[in-house]
Image: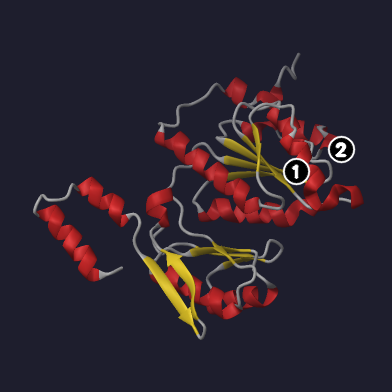
Amino acid sequence: MNADVLAALLEAVARGETDPRAAARRLAWLPVEPLTGSDGVFARVDHHRALRQGQAEVVFGQGKTPAEVVAICAALRERGRGFLVTRLEADALEAVAGAFPDAAIGARARVAFLAPAAPAPRSPDHPIVVVSAGTSDEPVVEEALFTCRAFGDPVRDVRDVGVAGLHRLVAEQDAFIGACAVVVIAGMEGALPSVVGGLVDVPVIGVPTSVGYGAALGGLTALLGMLTSCASGVTVVNIDSGFGGAAAASRIRRQVLAAGGAARDPGRAAALAGESGS
């Protein structure tokens, strides 16, 4: 941040020439820190994204060199924000692990997470539920879980409950009580979000994965299946985007908490129970 610009803005507030809320809005768009290499600027780190969006900038590691990833992570850490990096290539993942020994590494999802120096206290209420169809979806699941952790959201993890054995999903009905949103991760034909969407009363975010044989078309079949879901309240993110699904759920949770997090009827929130006793 430019110290002269900041000082001028604060002086204007002190003189009553600028409204404090207007000044806060201006500060929310500053600063952007350019990082330079031998070929010039390779990244512009957005340090104030959390002020604008409630979530710090997340680094997409794919295509970046190990040195570039480490430099971006270092810039974020120096501001006390910590970092979350997704889709790290093998050499970059190794470089981040070596440069930041305190970072948590998710090898299957190719992610790295370093908690902020002073994490803000977060409410344990209204968790996000991450549901996955099979063990083959694990890399995408891990990315979603790391994202929830990085954004400070409590999460319930329900794995291997695909439509080939729906009794497994029914057995986990208590996990949905009090949830604010459900992230459903599935490959093959992508049917699981429709099933969950017909059973719960909160937003369902489908994450299609590239898991499946030839006609699965690298996740396209699951994507189209989720987009044509007959259940209401189901929305869909990109193929293999565990980050995208969890980030959307995190924003939903922030709105729930901002609205006071009014308790919902457990009988509806636990709709998986249905009339199982009848």
Who is closer to the viewer here, 70 or 125? 70
Residue at figure coordinates x 76%, y 13% from the top left: 278
Residue 261, position as x, y percentages in the image: 45, 31
Q: Is residue 47 left or right of residue 137?
A: left
Residue 102 disc label: none
At numbered mark 2, what does the secondary structure look like: helix, strand or loop? helix
Q: Amino acid at mark 2?
A: Ala
Residue 134 in view (yes/no): no
Residue 7, position as x, y percentages in the image: 18, 65
* Front position among marks 1 and 2: 1
At numbered mark 1, what does the secondary structure look like: helix, strand or loop? helix
Q: Give the image quarter of residue 132.
A: top right
Specify the farthest residue to the right: 214
What residue sits right under mark 2 in the picture?
164
Who is closer to the viewer here, 236 or 146? 236
Specify the farthest residue to the top: 278
Residue 42 in view (yes/no): yes
Residue 127, position as x, y percentages in the image: 55, 40
What residue sits right under mark 1 in the picture?
223
Residue 81, position as x, y percentages in the image: 42, 63
| Neighbourhood count class around disc 1 (C-alpha, 10 Å): few under 14, some 14–19, many 20 upward | many
Image quarter hosting the N terminus: bottom left
Q: Amino acid at mark 1?
A: Leu
Asked if 154 appears above or below 110 in the picture, the reply is above
Q: Are marks 1 and 2 in contact (CB under 8 Å)?
A: no
Specify the farthest residue to the left: 15
Q: Give the image quarter of residue 77.
A: bottom left
